Image: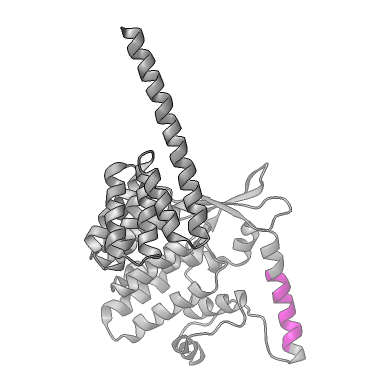
Amino acid sequence: QSRWLAAILAVLAVRWAAAAQTAAELIAEARATARRGDGDRADSLLKQAEQGLPGEALMLRGNIAMHVRKDVEGGMALFRASIAADATRWDSHYFLGRALADQERWDEATASFAASAELDPTKLTVLLDLGKAQAASGGFEDAAATMLRAAALDVHSSQALLLLAQTAVQRRELEAALRAYEDVTELLPWHAQPFLQLASLRVSLVASGVPERAAMAAAAAARPGAPSVCELRDAARALQPSIAVPEAVRRSCESGRLEGSKVVVPGTEFDDDIAIRDREAVAAQAKAVAEGPCHFLAAFPSLASRASTTASEPSSSSGPACVVRLPAGRALRLRHAEGDSSGQGESG
């Protein structure tokens, strides 16, 4: 009798496997059909696939409802049904969170994004949307922690740190905004705009007339090695000569009220003397960039004002290396591979 039971179970297992395979084929066909613009046919195929792979089929039907039929409530119901069928799908939680965020139901959106991030903590987009929802629901500290987690996922991208800085400005968390813009300019000093955003913030704090804000700006300027507002401006112009300088920053530097700059900016005037004088500066900057991040930081220390390069570590297969020491024991390792002028970074 036990042999008969085992045989029956084996047959059922084969049938279930065949059904799942059929469901996967239906889903693949539905995806292709949806890309061709036939949402109704895709939805019909996904309905057939629900028996074998309900979580994925229902999630995809939710996307068709949301984005093809513009049926928000129907889409949300399908996302919830997908989660009920398979609670381990990070994407179903994420798409439900997106739908809730579009309706500004921030607490619910936060819960959905958090569930998605817990299921798959490697998704940068999920963490960014979670941080936005947390900030919108009033939890700036949680939002900041989430955005820093997102920044750690991709040390080459400024997206998460800039989002943190912009969110901090919107929430009037000005000290956090200063710190975030400083991190962007120091850890990713090849983007021009953040230099001007940091300069603008420091100028606005001084001009606010609020003693506490002016003190924040003064403390930022007084940090060892911190660049002046005018150096921030000139660093941005060195990276992108055509960049538009905010009027408040331009006036502050030209009026002489702020400390001058040691950063040499390529001249744009058609004056031979200036062009000859600046040609050497341009050549020095180009050489520092070409030789990799270690040389770049050594040549332009104001671009990493709170960092100090140590003696180079022994060369490895990835080429010469240097370590930039940051506060609180943090370190960013920068490598320059042979024949590759784009450094690599990793936190440690």
Residue toward you, 166 or 199: 166
Instruction: Give residue 342's position: percent from left, percent from top.
Output: 64, 58
Residue toward you, 88 or 304: 88
- The quarter of the displayed image where residue 11 is located: top left
Instruction: Give residue 127's position: percent from left, percent from top.
Output: 38, 56
Residue drawn at 39 percent across, 45 percent down: 48
Residue drawn at 55 percent across, 66 percent down: 189
**Number of numbered discs:** 0
204 to 312, vertically: above or below: below
The answer to whether residue 127 is visible is: no
- Give the magenta range: 274-285
Tell me if 272 is positioned left or right of 289 in this view: right
Is 279 within the magenta?
Answer: yes
Residue toward you, 124 or 22: 22
Is 83 within the magenta?
Answer: no
Magenta region, mostly helix, strand or loop? Answer: helix
- The quarter of the displayed image where residue 43 is located: bottom left
131 to 197, vertically: above or below: above
Instruction: Give residue 241's position: percent from left, percent from top.
Output: 62, 81
Instruction: Give residue 108's position: percent from left, percent from top.
Output: 23, 58
Residue drawn at 47 percent across, 36 percent down: 21
